[in-house]
Amino acid sequence: MQLFKRLFPDFKVQKISVNAGFSCPNRDGTIGHGGCIYCDNTSFTPGYCLCGDSIAEQIKKGKQFFARKYPEMKYLVYFQSFTSTHTDSLDTLRSIYREAMGSPDVVGLVIGTRPDTLTPKVVDLLREINATHPVIVEIGAETSFDKTLQLINRGHTWRDVESATALCHSRGLHCGLHLIAGLPGETQEMILETVRRACHLPIDTIKLHQLQIVRGTELHRRHEAGELEVTPFELNEYLNLCADITETVAVESAGRIEIERYTSQAPPDKVIAPKWGLKNYQFTDRLRRLISTRTLNPNQP
Ligand code: SF4
Protein backbone atom coordinates (compact mmCIF):
# COMPACT_ATOMS: atom_id res chain seq x y z
CA MET A 1 0.00 0.00 0.00
CA GLN A 2 1.22 3.52 -0.75
CA LEU A 3 3.02 5.22 2.12
CA PHE A 4 0.56 8.11 2.40
CA LYS A 5 -2.43 5.75 2.44
CA ARG A 6 -0.74 3.68 5.11
CA LEU A 7 0.01 6.72 7.26
CA PHE A 8 -3.30 8.49 6.69
CA PRO A 9 -5.94 5.83 6.00
CA ASP A 10 -8.92 8.06 6.86
CA PHE A 11 -8.46 11.04 4.57
CA LYS A 12 -6.75 12.32 1.44
CA VAL A 13 -3.54 14.27 1.88
CA GLN A 14 -1.91 16.81 -0.36
CA LYS A 15 1.61 18.22 -0.14
CA ILE A 16 1.99 21.97 0.06
CA SER A 17 5.48 23.20 -0.79
CA VAL A 18 6.80 26.05 1.33
CA ASN A 19 9.97 28.07 1.18
CA ALA A 20 11.23 28.53 4.73
CA GLY A 21 14.32 30.44 3.67
CA PHE A 22 16.70 27.52 4.14
CA SER A 23 20.11 27.71 2.56
CA CYS A 24 22.22 24.83 1.28
CA PRO A 25 25.55 23.84 2.86
CA ASN A 26 26.82 23.03 -0.60
CA ARG A 27 26.25 26.64 -1.66
CA ASP A 28 26.80 28.76 1.45
CA GLY A 29 30.34 27.52 2.09
CA THR A 30 29.53 25.20 5.02
CA ILE A 31 30.75 22.30 2.92
CA GLY A 32 31.14 23.87 -0.50
CA HIS A 33 30.34 26.67 -2.92
CA GLY A 34 28.53 26.61 -6.23
CA GLY A 35 26.23 23.68 -5.42
CA CYS A 36 25.49 20.56 -7.43
CA ILE A 37 26.21 21.20 -11.09
CA TYR A 38 22.62 20.49 -12.23
CA CYS A 39 20.92 22.53 -9.51
CA ASP A 40 18.61 25.41 -10.23
CA ASN A 41 16.52 25.48 -7.08
CA THR A 42 13.93 27.86 -8.54
CA SER A 43 13.02 25.22 -11.12
CA PHE A 44 11.43 23.05 -8.42
CA THR A 45 9.92 25.80 -6.27
CA PRO A 46 6.25 26.68 -6.96
CA GLY A 47 5.47 30.35 -7.63
CA TYR A 48 3.59 30.87 -4.36
CA CYS A 49 6.79 30.02 -2.42
CA LEU A 50 8.93 32.74 -3.95
CA CYS A 51 7.27 35.79 -2.42
CA GLY A 52 8.78 36.09 1.05
CA ASP A 53 5.49 35.26 2.83
CA SER A 54 5.63 33.60 6.23
CA ILE A 55 5.32 29.82 6.36
CA ALA A 56 1.78 30.10 7.73
CA GLU A 57 0.83 32.47 4.89
CA GLN A 58 2.28 30.16 2.24
CA ILE A 59 0.34 27.22 3.71
CA LYS A 60 -2.84 29.30 3.68
CA LYS A 61 -2.33 30.19 0.01
CA GLY A 62 -1.53 26.58 -0.88
CA LYS A 63 -4.68 25.40 0.91
CA GLN A 64 -6.83 27.96 -0.91
CA PHE A 65 -5.57 26.51 -4.17
CA PHE A 66 -6.42 22.88 -3.32
CA ALA A 67 -9.42 23.25 -0.99
CA ARG A 68 -11.71 24.50 -3.79
CA LYS A 69 -11.65 21.03 -5.34
CA TYR A 70 -11.29 18.91 -2.19
CA PRO A 71 -12.67 20.71 0.90
CA GLU A 72 -12.03 17.67 3.15
CA MET A 73 -8.35 17.47 2.24
CA LYS A 74 -5.60 17.41 4.89
CA TYR A 75 -2.10 18.67 4.24
CA LEU A 76 1.56 17.73 4.50
CA VAL A 77 3.90 20.67 4.56
CA TYR A 78 6.67 20.01 2.09
CA PHE A 79 10.00 21.66 2.83
CA GLN A 80 11.39 21.13 -0.65
CA SER A 81 13.69 24.04 -1.45
CA PHE A 82 17.38 23.84 -0.66
CA THR A 83 18.35 21.82 2.48
CA SER A 84 15.51 21.76 4.98
CA THR A 85 17.50 20.59 7.99
CA HIS A 86 20.28 23.17 7.59
CA THR A 87 19.98 26.15 9.98
CA ASP A 88 22.16 28.06 12.41
CA SER A 89 20.63 26.28 15.41
CA LEU A 90 18.31 23.51 16.47
CA ASP A 91 15.96 26.12 18.02
CA THR A 92 15.55 27.85 14.66
CA LEU A 93 14.76 24.53 13.04
CA ARG A 94 12.26 23.65 15.77
CA SER A 95 10.43 26.97 15.41
CA ILE A 96 10.22 26.59 11.60
CA TYR A 97 8.67 23.12 11.90
CA ARG A 98 6.37 24.25 14.73
CA GLU A 99 5.00 27.12 12.64
CA ALA A 100 4.12 24.62 9.92
CA MET A 101 2.58 22.12 12.36
CA GLY A 102 0.47 24.89 13.92
CA SER A 103 -1.48 25.61 10.73
CA PRO A 104 -5.00 24.17 10.55
CA ASP A 105 -5.38 20.83 8.72
CA VAL A 106 -1.63 20.16 8.62
CA VAL A 107 -1.14 16.50 9.57
CA GLY A 108 2.52 15.89 8.77
CA LEU A 109 5.79 17.15 7.35
CA VAL A 110 7.90 16.14 4.37
CA ILE A 111 11.49 17.24 4.78
CA GLY A 112 13.74 17.35 1.71
CA THR A 113 17.38 17.33 2.69
CA ARG A 114 20.94 16.10 2.22
CA PRO A 115 22.27 13.04 4.08
CA ASP A 116 25.17 14.94 5.66
CA THR A 117 22.91 17.39 7.53
CA LEU A 118 20.94 14.65 9.29
CA THR A 119 22.89 14.73 12.55
CA PRO A 120 21.68 12.71 15.56
CA LYS A 121 20.33 15.94 17.16
CA VAL A 122 18.36 16.89 14.05
CA VAL A 123 17.00 13.37 13.70
CA ASP A 124 15.98 13.38 17.38
CA LEU A 125 14.05 16.61 16.76
CA LEU A 126 12.30 14.94 13.82
CA ARG A 127 11.46 11.96 16.02
CA GLU A 128 9.90 14.35 18.55
CA ILE A 129 7.69 15.85 15.82
CA ASN A 130 6.91 12.42 14.39
CA ALA A 131 5.16 11.52 17.65
CA THR A 132 2.25 13.84 16.72
CA HIS A 133 2.80 14.67 13.03
CA PRO A 134 4.24 11.91 10.82
CA VAL A 135 7.53 12.99 9.29
CA ILE A 136 8.77 11.73 5.95
CA VAL A 137 12.43 12.51 5.30
CA GLU A 138 13.39 12.79 1.64
CA ILE A 139 17.13 12.27 1.29
CA GLY A 140 18.91 13.39 -1.85
CA ALA A 141 21.26 10.55 -2.74
CA GLU A 142 21.18 10.87 -6.56
CA THR A 143 23.57 7.94 -7.18
CA SER A 144 25.48 5.30 -5.24
CA PHE A 145 28.73 5.95 -7.14
CA ASP A 146 31.14 8.23 -5.26
CA LYS A 147 32.98 9.03 -8.49
CA THR A 148 29.79 10.50 -9.94
CA LEU A 149 28.93 12.28 -6.67
CA GLN A 150 32.31 13.96 -6.91
CA LEU A 151 31.84 14.86 -10.58
CA ILE A 152 28.50 16.53 -9.93
CA ASN A 153 29.88 18.31 -6.84
CA ARG A 154 27.41 16.81 -4.36
CA GLY A 155 29.85 17.11 -1.47
CA HIS A 156 28.80 13.85 0.20
CA THR A 157 29.34 10.13 -0.30
CA TRP A 158 27.14 7.07 -0.59
CA ARG A 159 28.36 6.06 2.88
CA ASP A 160 26.69 9.28 4.16
CA VAL A 161 23.44 8.09 2.58
CA GLU A 162 23.72 4.67 4.24
CA SER A 163 24.38 6.28 7.65
CA ALA A 164 21.55 8.82 7.32
CA THR A 165 18.95 6.24 6.32
CA ALA A 166 20.04 3.93 9.16
CA LEU A 167 19.80 6.79 11.67
CA CYS A 168 16.34 7.89 10.49
CA HIS A 169 15.13 4.29 10.54
CA SER A 170 16.46 3.77 14.07
CA ARG A 171 14.34 6.77 15.20
CA GLY A 172 11.19 5.44 13.55
CA LEU A 173 11.07 8.01 10.73
CA HIS A 174 9.77 7.27 7.26
CA CYS A 175 12.40 7.72 4.63
CA GLY A 176 12.45 8.32 0.89
CA LEU A 177 15.48 8.35 -1.36
CA HIS A 178 15.88 10.75 -4.26
CA LEU A 179 17.78 9.46 -7.30
CA ILE A 180 18.69 10.94 -10.67
CA ALA A 181 19.00 8.79 -13.80
CA GLY A 182 21.36 9.86 -16.55
CA LEU A 183 24.11 11.58 -14.58
CA PRO A 184 27.31 12.16 -16.58
CA GLY A 185 29.43 9.05 -16.99
CA GLU A 186 26.76 6.64 -15.77
CA THR A 187 25.53 3.68 -17.82
CA GLN A 188 22.09 2.13 -17.47
CA GLU A 189 23.69 -0.77 -15.60
CA MET A 190 25.15 1.69 -13.08
CA ILE A 191 21.72 3.26 -12.58
CA LEU A 192 20.22 -0.19 -11.96
CA GLU A 193 23.05 -0.98 -9.54
CA THR A 194 22.23 2.18 -7.58
CA VAL A 195 18.59 1.11 -7.47
CA ARG A 196 19.61 -2.35 -6.23
CA ARG A 197 21.78 -0.80 -3.50
CA ALA A 198 18.94 1.56 -2.53
CA CYS A 199 16.61 -1.41 -2.14
CA HIS A 200 18.79 -2.76 0.64
CA LEU A 201 18.51 0.43 2.68
CA PRO A 202 15.77 0.90 5.31
CA ILE A 203 13.67 3.23 3.13
CA ASP A 204 10.00 3.34 2.18
CA THR A 205 10.06 5.15 -1.15
CA ILE A 206 12.24 6.01 -4.12
CA LYS A 207 11.75 9.21 -6.05
CA LEU A 208 13.44 9.14 -9.39
CA HIS A 209 13.80 11.56 -12.22
CA GLN A 210 15.66 11.96 -15.47
CA LEU A 211 18.60 14.33 -15.53
CA GLN A 212 17.49 17.63 -17.03
CA ILE A 213 19.86 20.21 -18.39
CA VAL A 214 18.43 23.41 -16.96
CA ARG A 215 19.34 26.78 -18.41
CA GLY A 216 21.94 28.72 -16.47
CA THR A 217 23.27 25.81 -14.39
CA GLU A 218 26.89 24.71 -14.26
CA LEU A 219 25.82 21.52 -16.06
CA HIS A 220 24.42 23.65 -18.90
CA ARG A 221 27.60 25.71 -19.09
CA ARG A 222 29.90 22.66 -19.17
CA HIS A 223 27.68 20.87 -21.66
CA GLU A 224 27.68 23.91 -24.01
CA ALA A 225 31.44 24.28 -23.64
CA GLY A 226 31.95 20.60 -24.52
CA GLU A 227 33.64 20.02 -21.15
CA LEU A 228 31.20 17.36 -20.02
CA GLU A 229 29.50 14.70 -22.06
CA VAL A 230 25.82 14.45 -21.19
CA THR A 231 23.41 12.41 -23.25
CA PRO A 232 19.83 13.21 -22.27
CA PHE A 233 17.48 10.22 -22.44
CA GLU A 234 15.23 9.67 -25.44
CA LEU A 235 11.68 9.12 -24.25
CA ASN A 236 11.45 5.42 -25.21
CA GLU A 237 14.87 4.68 -23.79
CA TYR A 238 13.86 6.21 -20.46
CA LEU A 239 10.50 4.41 -20.46
CA ASN A 240 12.30 1.08 -20.89
CA LEU A 241 14.78 1.94 -18.16
CA CYS A 242 11.93 2.86 -15.80
CA ALA A 243 10.24 -0.47 -16.53
CA ASP A 244 13.53 -2.22 -15.66
CA ILE A 245 13.80 -0.14 -12.49
CA THR A 246 10.23 -0.98 -11.50
CA GLU A 247 10.93 -4.70 -11.89
CA THR A 248 14.22 -4.39 -10.02
CA VAL A 249 12.62 -2.59 -7.07
CA ALA A 250 9.77 -5.12 -6.91
CA VAL A 251 12.21 -8.04 -6.79
CA GLU A 252 15.04 -6.58 -4.70
CA SER A 253 12.81 -5.00 -2.06
CA ALA A 254 10.22 -7.82 -2.18
CA GLY A 255 7.49 -5.20 -2.65
CA ARG A 256 8.57 -3.19 0.41
CA ILE A 257 9.61 -0.04 -1.46
CA GLU A 258 7.27 2.09 -3.52
CA ILE A 259 8.43 4.23 -6.45
CA GLU A 260 6.79 7.56 -5.80
CA ARG A 261 7.76 9.30 -9.02
CA TYR A 262 9.68 8.70 -12.25
CA THR A 263 10.01 12.10 -13.86
CA SER A 264 10.40 15.73 -13.04
CA GLN A 265 9.57 18.69 -15.24
CA ALA A 266 11.35 21.99 -14.77
CA PRO A 267 9.47 24.92 -16.37
CA PRO A 268 9.62 24.42 -20.19
CA ASP A 269 11.41 27.74 -20.82
CA LYS A 270 14.23 26.60 -18.53
CA VAL A 271 14.77 23.08 -19.88
CA ILE A 272 17.43 22.68 -22.55
CA ALA A 273 17.02 18.86 -22.72
CA PRO A 274 15.35 16.43 -22.75
CA LYS A 275 12.12 17.90 -24.11
CA TRP A 276 9.52 15.13 -24.34
CA GLY A 277 6.38 17.25 -24.36
CA LEU A 278 4.64 14.90 -21.91
CA LYS A 279 2.99 15.63 -18.58
CA ASN A 280 4.05 13.42 -15.66
CA TYR A 281 0.73 11.53 -15.66
CA GLN A 282 1.07 10.87 -19.44
CA PHE A 283 4.52 9.40 -18.84
CA THR A 284 3.17 7.20 -16.06
CA ASP A 285 0.31 5.99 -18.33
CA ARG A 286 2.79 4.99 -21.03
CA LEU A 287 5.01 3.28 -18.47
CA ARG A 288 2.07 1.29 -17.10
CA ARG A 289 1.17 0.16 -20.61
CA LEU A 290 4.78 -0.85 -21.28
CA ILE A 291 5.01 -2.84 -18.05
CA SER A 292 1.75 -4.66 -18.75
CA THR A 293 2.96 -5.50 -22.28
CA ARG A 294 6.13 -6.96 -20.82
CA THR A 295 4.10 -9.03 -18.37
CA LEU A 296 1.95 -10.40 -21.20
CA ASN A 297 4.96 -11.07 -23.47
CA PRO A 298 7.86 -11.80 -21.12
CA ASN A 299 10.19 -12.98 -23.93
CA GLN A 300 9.93 -9.81 -25.98
CA PRO A 301 13.10 -7.71 -25.96
S1 SF4 B 1 20.59 20.13 -5.43
FE1 SF4 B 1 20.20 20.41 -3.24
S2 SF4 B 1 22.17 19.94 -2.30
FE2 SF4 B 1 22.61 20.37 -4.43
S3 SF4 B 1 23.09 22.57 -4.52
FE3 SF4 B 1 20.91 22.33 -4.96
S4 SF4 B 1 19.90 22.61 -3.01
FE4 SF4 B 1 22.06 22.18 -2.58
Image (cartoon, grey):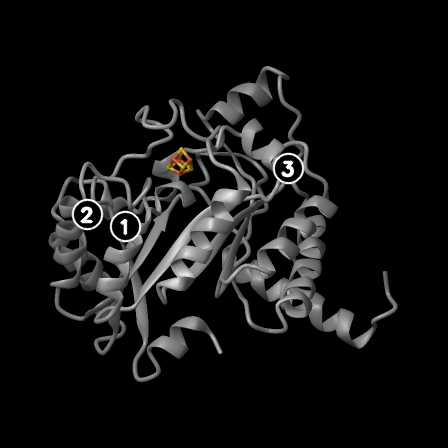
Would you identify the image quadrant in which residue 109 lies? bottom left
Q: Which of marks 3 and 2 is in front?
A: 2
Task: Indicate which label's residue lies in the foreground, 1 or 3.
Answer: 1
The answer to whether the residues at label 1 and label 2 have Cβ atoms under 8 Å apart is yes
Using residue 101 as the reference point, say whether residue 278 is left or right of it: right
Q: Quadrant of the C terminus?
A: bottom right
Residue at 22 percent of width and 69 percent of height: 67
Is there any visible trace of residue 174 in the rendered image? no
**250 w.r.t. 45: above or below:** below
Question: Which of the labelled discs sits on residue 254, or is there none?
Answer: none
Does label 3 point to a residue whose CB lies under 8 Å from ligand 1? no
268 relative position to 89: left or right: right
Secondary structure beneath dot 1 equals: helix
Position of 278 relative to 185 (above/below): below
Residue at the disc numbered 1: 122
Horizontal and vertical percent position of residue 71: 21, 76
259 or 61: which is nearer to us? 259
**Disc sitting over residue 93 in the figure:** 2
Residue at x 61%, y 37% (from the top left corner) = 183
- Of the two numbered discs 3 and 2 on the same chain, state the one appearing first in sequence: 2
Disc 1 or disc 2, which is closer to the eye?
Answer: 1
Q: What residue type is labelled 1?
A: Val
Counting residues from the N terminus, which is met first, the one under dot 1 or under dot 2? 2
Whether the residue under disc 2 has CB within 8 Å of ligand 1: no
Q: Position of residue 86 (x, y in %)?
A: 27, 40
* Residue under label 3: 232
Taking the image in four quarters, ligand 1 sits in the one at: top left
